[in-house]
Amino acid sequence: MAQEREKIFRLIETADNFVKYAAPGREARAEARARKRYLKAQRLAEQSRDDGLVEQVRLRLADLERRSTLAPAERDAGSDDDTITSEPPEHATARMPPGQRIVRGWPVLHEGRIPRFDESTWSFSVDGACADAFALSYSELQDQGPTEMTSDFHCVTGWSKLDNHWRGVQTKELLGRAIPSEGATHVLVHAEQGYTANVPLDVLQEDESMLAWGHNGKQLAPKHGWPLRLVVPRLYGWKSVKWVRRFELLTADQRGFWEIRGYHNRADPWLEERYSYQEAEPA
Ligand SMILES: Nc1nc2c(c(=O)[nH]1)N[C@H]1C(S)=C(S)[C@@H](COP(=O)(O)O)O[C@H]1N2
Ligand SMILES: [Mo]
């Protein structure tokens, strides 16, 4: 049973990757290949009466439908130069989590389109389980920084990008200002267009967790999350939400976009917490 789930999810993952890494101009073809595999996964999941997987596939087929209505220029995912190279530089091998490879360049991965930024209506808010909910304009937010921090980035699809020099504000500063309630345990991070990811509060209170607007000495590119992206080096990359607008403090955990679609709720790359079917296994 567990093995069957794993097999089916692998099929889903292969299809996910066709979509994520479609070559420019070949998106439609990649989506057709993905759809075929999703449909096969759907059949298998139905046969094994696995309602969780059936739902995960249903969500993806709906994602694919929505995606096919975007003009190619609006998607702008895929990447400039995302060749996965072989080995990390010798000094960095200890910094590579299991099953990861160094990437050259910087892949661009997201659902939906790159949002337009309108500073006059934009705000970042912290609310939910806290004593002092607040909202900041973009300039007020930038007045909180800048802090600079270098960290590594690990994507669940297998690439890692080391030595990112981020410029922004530490999330512990912003959370501290909101004064989390005693029972607050998690943050649901909300982005433009409904993308979300859940992150344990204690992870966002670590020094390395930041909201960033600069990368390696330059303004962060819109495709990488400008005007504001979360950086959580401790967890797989899908938790590093681009185009962040809101931190919602929670007193109980709540799964985000990819966590609902079969990726691991916790997502520690050092433990290879990639998929939700691993969650049932004893620690
Ligand atoms: N808003 C938003 N943030 C997102 C995503 C997304 O689809 N939407 N994708 C995530 C995933 S899966 C990864 S690996 C990283 C990729 O960041 P990059 O495109 O800057 O490399 O962004 C994460 N943040
Ligand atoms: Mo990712």
Image (cartoon, rainbow, N blue to C red):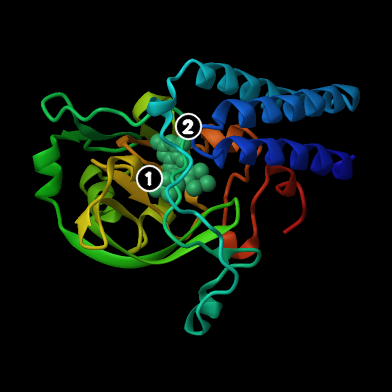
Instruction: Give the label on residue 182, or none.
Output: 1
Distance from Cα at disc 1 to Cα at disc 2? 34 Å
Quarter-of-image position of residue 214: bottom left
Q: Is mark 2 within 8 Å of ligand 1?
A: yes
Indicate the quadrant of ligand 1 in the picture.
top left
Q: Is residue 219 left or right of residue 143?
A: right
**Residue found at the far bottom of this picture:** 91
- Which image quadrant: the N terminus? top right
Residue 275 or 23: which is nearer the viewer? 23
Instruction: Give the label on residue 35, or none.
Output: none
Quarter-of-image position of residue 7: top right
Look at the picture and state if 184 lies above or below 281. above
Q: Amino acid at mark 2?
A: Glu
Instruction: Give the label on residue 111, or none.
Output: 2
* Mark 1 crowdedness (10 Å alpha carbons): few <14, some 14-19, many ≥20: few
N-terminal of the pair, mark 1 or mark 2, is: 2
**Residue found at the far front of this picture:** 25
Q: Position of residue 75 (x, y in %)?
A: 43, 29
Q: Position of residue 213 (x, y in %)?
A: 23, 49
Q: Amino acid at mark 1?
A: Glu
Q: Position of residue 39 (x, y in %)?
A: 77, 23
Residue shown at the point (13%, 30%) measured from the top left? 119
Look at the picture and state if 266 lies above or below 253. below
Q: Nearer the viewer, mark 1 or mark 2?
A: 2
Res 251 visible? no
Per the image, label 2 sits on a secondary structure element best described as loop
Residue shown at the point (58%, 52%) measured from the top left? 156
Res 98 visible? yes
Look at the picture and state if 226 lies above or below 237. above
